[in-house]
């Protein structure tokens, strides 16, 4: 955890983004790491956990993190939480809480609230288009014999 916290400080002081760091460990070995890179990369998805997940998946040559532990300097935001669940690590450890992050100006509470709102009524309206046409891709997926489930 101390290494994740150190990454958070160093990345922030370098001007890469907010004070967030993350390492991913498998069998006692660091296989991925990252700090928040939003400002440096001009990528709103470049949160520490996402950067670390990408790094670990590349190192492990796998799209999942089975048997890994995630150490992150702060409780994951909704986006990172989703990425973590998709990556399927064994466990997540975090230092600061989402309330600590909110007090520092990183408040994600509005996102948690928006999840419960009907898509068309969200602050950024989401409107379904061409559903029937798009369902054809799911039908092809269902029929695909050599698919990899994840």
Image (tube, rainbow, N blue to C red):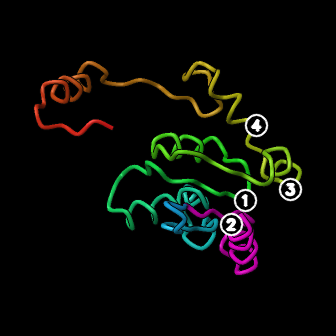
Give the magenta range. 1-24
Residue under numbered circle 3: 104
Compare marks 4 and 1 and give the one earlier in the sequence.
1
Work out which residue is located at the far bottom of the displayed protein and give it: 14
Name the mark on residue 103: none
Circle 4 residue? 109
Sequence-first tag of 1 and 3: 1
Q: How far apart are marks 2 and 3 (CA)?
A: 18 Å
Real-space Cα distance between discs 2 and 4?
A: 23 Å
Q: SS class of the residue under badge 2? A: helix
| Marks 4 and 3, how far apart at CA | 13 Å
Q: Which residue lies at the image location 78% right of the left edge and 52% below the top edge?
A: 106
Q: Which residue is drawn at 80% across and 53% down?
A: 96
Q: Name the spot of residue 121 as percent of width and height, x first.
A: 61, 21
Residue occupying image coordinates x 46% and y 41%:
86
Disc sitting over residue 4 in the figure = 2
Classify mark 3: helix, strand or loop: loop
């Amino acid at each position: 955890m101390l290494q994740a916290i150190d990454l958070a400080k160093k990345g922030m002081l370098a001007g890469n983004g907010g004070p967030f760091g993350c390492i991913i460990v498998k069998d006692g070995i660091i296989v991925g790491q990252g700090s928040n890179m939003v400002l440096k990369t001009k990528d709103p998805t470049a949160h520490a956990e996402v950067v670390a997940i990408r790094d670990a998946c590349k190192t492990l040559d796998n799209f999942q993190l089975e048997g890994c532990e995630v150490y992150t300097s702060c409780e994951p935001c909704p986006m990172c939480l989703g990425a973590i669940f998709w990556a399927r690590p064994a466990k997540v450890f975090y230092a600061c809480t989402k309330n600590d992050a909110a007090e520092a100006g990183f408040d994600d509470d509005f996102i948690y609230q928006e999840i419960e709102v009907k898509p068309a009524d969200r602050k950024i309206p989401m409107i379904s288009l061409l559903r029937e046409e798009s369902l054809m891709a799911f039908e092809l997926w269902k029929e695909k014999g050599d698919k990899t489930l994840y």
